[in-house]
Image (tube, rainbow, N blue to C red):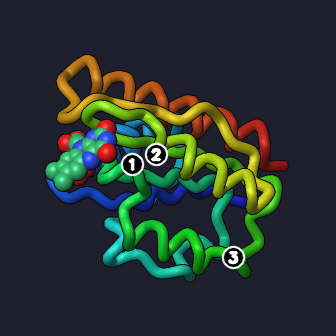
Amino acid sequence: MHMAKVVIIYDSATHNTELMSGAIADGVRAEGMEVMVSHVHEAKLEMINDIDGLVLGSGTYHHEIMPALEVFIEKMKGLELKDKVGAAFCSYGWSPEVVDLITNRLKGYGMKTVDGLLIKEKPDEAGLERCRQFGRKVATLVKGNVR
Ligand SMILES: Cc1cc2nc3c(=O)[nH]c(=O)nc-3n(C[C@H](O)[C@H](O)[C@H](O)COP(=O)(O)O)c2cc1C
């Protein structure tokens, strides 16, 4: 039997998006699914060769996806991502666009995407709970998508 796997890769300069990634992972695990979390600096393309769901996160700097994550997304071009579940999350200060920028890149690879998750600055306990719920939602979608 295939064991469904989700990978979370993020970039974060002041740890806000990083805090989100940990809580999202908790939510995925709460659905009984295997999950791997990696800062983009440690991420390898091989990590996402054989996944069922990919969740990408970035802080917002100058209205853009953070540069190292941008490079990673570009390198994903050759991978078999079509029809897999993809989702984005983002910490921001005043402008919400990066979560959609990431989601659109995943759509461009043919992934089945969901509305991304946005948290303003550092997630508080309510924000962390939203992250956990988001992780559960992604895991539930992955379950429904894997046959
Ligand atoms: C130099 C700089 C540029 C920023 N640019 C934006 C921006 O364009 N839009 C926005 O919403 N927030 C912006 N922010 C706020 C950060 O996105 C916010 O603090 C976020 O929580 C950082 O996430 P991180 O801790 O994961 O790096 C900026 C912050 C800094 C320090």
Q: Is residue 49 above or below residue 118?
A: below
CB within 8 Å, label 2 to label 1? yes
Residue kind at label 1, given as amino acid type: His
| Residue at the disc numbered 1 | 63
- Distance between the Cα atoms at labels 3 and 1? 23 Å
Residue kind at label 3, given as amino acid type: Lys
Q: Residue visible at 47% across and 39% down?
A: 97
- Distance between the Cα atoms at labels 2 and 1? 6 Å
| Residue at the disc numbered 2 | 98
Q: Position of residue 27 (x, y in %)?
A: 42, 35
| Residue at the disc numbered 3 | 77
Q: Residues within 10 Å of mark 1 (few under 14, many from 20)?
A: some
Q: Residue visible at 53% across and 35% down?
A: 116
Q: Is residue 92 above or below residue 15?
A: above
Q: Position of residue 82 (x, y in %)?
A: 81, 61
Residue found at the very far top of the displayed protein: 126
